Amino acid sequence: MTATLPAAAAPAASPQPTPPLPSLDEPRVAAEATEVRRSTGAIRRTDIFGILGAAAAAIALSLWLMTQLLIFQGILPFVGFAYIFFVIIYGIVTRFDESGMAVRDRLVSVLVHSLALVLMLALVWVVGFTFISGFPPLLHLNFFTTDMSAAGPLDPLTRGGILHAMVGTLIMISIALAISIPLGVATAVYLSEFPGRYSRVIRTVVEAMTALPSIVAGLFIYATVILLLGFPRSGFAASLAITVMMLPIIIRSSDVVLRLVPGGLKEASQALGSSRWRTVWHVVLPTARSGLTTAVILGTARGVGETSPVLLTAGLTTFFNFNPFSGPMISLPLATYTFVKSPEENFVQRGFGSAAVLMLLVLVLFIIARLIGGRGPGVLTARQLRRRLQQSRGDDYRFRARELGIAKDGRKAVSLATPAPPTQPQSSVVSKAADTTVKSRFRRGRNAGGTS
Amino acid sequence: MTDAPTAVLEPASAPEPGPLVEDKPRSLKAKSDRSDLPFRIGTRTAASAVLAIMLLVGVFLLLQGGQALSAAGPLKFLTTQSWEPNSGVFGIAAVILGSIFIALTAIVVAVPLATGTALYISEYAPRQIKQGLVTLVDLMAAVPSVVYGLWGLKALQPNITGVSQFIATWFGWIPIFHVDGFDPSDPLSSPTTFTSSTFIIGLVVGMMVAPITCSIMREVFTQAPIGEREGALALGATKWGMIRRVVIPFGRGGMIGGTMLGLGRALGETIAVALIVSPVFVVQPQILKSGANSISALIALRYSESSPFEISALMAAGLALFILTLIVNFGASLVISRSRSGASSD
């Protein structure tokens, strides 16, 4: 290092090339040309051999235990034993050439990987099992187009369907959303805009209520609407129960999203003299739009899948009911539940079918939520960005046109090349232009706020 | 003349303390715009409505369950095991303990799985699949409980009784794994001894709460300060050493909070339990033995063929469940808010 430093400093002092310089430079150029990206991974060949060997030994040992000593039967105990042996043997194998600390590290790594694998496999099993078992009824078109009123207990899958449950789910969730979106978002706005002791109390209560057992929500509506007010079981009562369950979820996640809106945006809006209401309506809510949508959709996904509140409040029916205010109404999860409890094989199949439809519905809702909510607050899609850019260019063009003393509509005026009288409408134009600048400022600021 | 300098000095120094004393902190209260008043009132009304609804849940359960509670007496209601409201003998001792057993089994299953998965996602997973795994776990938290119940009833139960039998055979000497009436040496013993047990229900509910617990844990694990992580690694810690000394201490509050939220969920889970359970009204601490119960399953299975008094008794049971979950949830949020989780170190 000390030897190279003067050599490197020399050329700066003296212009003529010194002999050591090329020899110092050349290898660096060569190295740059042939430089290969070094793998920063810490996996060596011996590690892989260790894992493979331990796995083979563990499988062999547990096969021997199962087939020769008959200590256990079945695939699950086999997997369990093989896993335990694998951990032990892998630990011993690693101990041959590593320190105790490294062995612990490896074993924990194995444990973490396998725990994650088990959970993922179980989850895939749940979804896969539902779809595969629910497939046969889905092949019949009548499953989607008829209700169960015409289907007897022994009828095959070609008769009867779950249209009534799908319609019921749709009606219930629509009513629930119609109540819970305005109420929930308004509450979330209150929590984020007016902090104080009262809103802290509300936030605490709402947070505690997010894990409200769904059956308790059902019982509450049962106690009030059906027992106290004397209404019969209906789709409307069920949607109220779903609302009680969904409200805390929507409020909580909306509150989190609203708190992510950059304070600078709100302050800028207020500094320009807009009232709080205008700030919320034109700045806060549009900025948080994607996050709010995600909150609502995730709440919907929970609400759609809830069985127990509907079970207590909606009643059971096998035929169509479009009126949520009178007569019982059934939803997809409730239909699944009642189908599966039946001893008839065909009904159980229909139960699987409706579970698959329900699962599909939740999946679609979830994917929509991800597509909308994958971005942070105020981050725009490519198309939105292009539109904003175009709008901004248009504004810029118009301003410059006006500076040049051309009329309100810049493009037309330029093409006609007639200077407009800048007299009467000037003030309104100015205020409008100022308005658009402010708006585009916000939009631009929003982008910046979102990406930073 | 000696007075003169002081007289000259006085006016120069006197005005200075004057304005300082008068300089009170300015009130930061902004005069609110008139157009803001409806806005303020509107949102406040909405928030109050939500608060009222949430409080009414408790009040109405208390009112409706009051009849049964006063008929049975609160103490007897808590200690009686059987459930025969029409003959006046009923209590929640069996069902509430059943709920707790199921929830504890679920937590014992879910917490290692959730912790492992959360650590895998935040520490071990390759960057390419990380986002996909996060989405998958979040999706699983949104899967309807009836789907989990269906899976537990039709897919898990037929496969898991062998495991139950194995545990009962080899670990039957541990009291909770003991199964009355099961003799390992009897080859004719029926596998139905092991169906619909607390263990199986707990497994299903555990699968249900694991994604929720996992996503909370992952959140706090990924927030562990990068400086401390790198410091640990630079000091020569292995990955596990770094996780144990930095990530887990940092995320402990989130871990406990997530676990308790999962516990609250598991206590209130209804449909998955109701699908699998075969109700018994005795305290059943043998988790592998057929027969279990929970408050929510009791309500779901009994509400339809109930007289008004029975409904009142069910409301009282629902109130007990409500209070139990409230305690657990408040504890969870207290732990989360008190912990260092989420706070950066620098």
Image: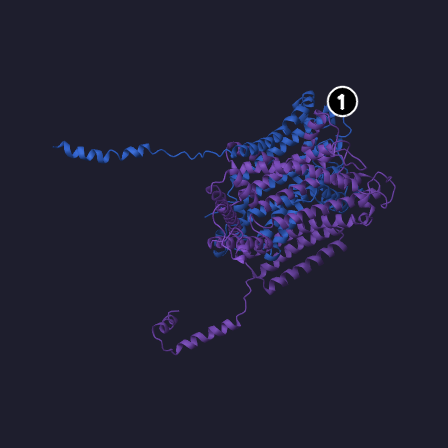
Horizontal arrangement in the rendering, residue B340 relative to residue A342 (left or right)? left
Single out the residue that lies furthest toward the top: B71
**Chain under callout 1:** B
Residue B255 x %, y %: 57, 43
Q: Tell me if residue B339 comes above or below residue A72 in the rendering.
A: above
Q: For chain B, give the colour.
A: blue
Quarter location, residue B261: top right
Q: Give the SS element for disc 1.
A: helix
Q: Quarter of the image containing the N terminus of chain A?
A: bottom left
Horizontal arrangement in the rendering, residue B51 relative to residue A148 (left or right)? left
Residue A339 x %, y %: 80, 40
Question: Label 1, on which residue?
Answer: B87
Horizontal arrangement in the rendering, residue A189 relative to residue A237 (left or right)? left
Residue B186 x %, y %: 80, 43
Which residue is depicted at the point 72% across and 49% down? Answer: A127
* Amino acid on which the number 1 mark rests in the picture: Ser
In the picture, which chain is purple?
A
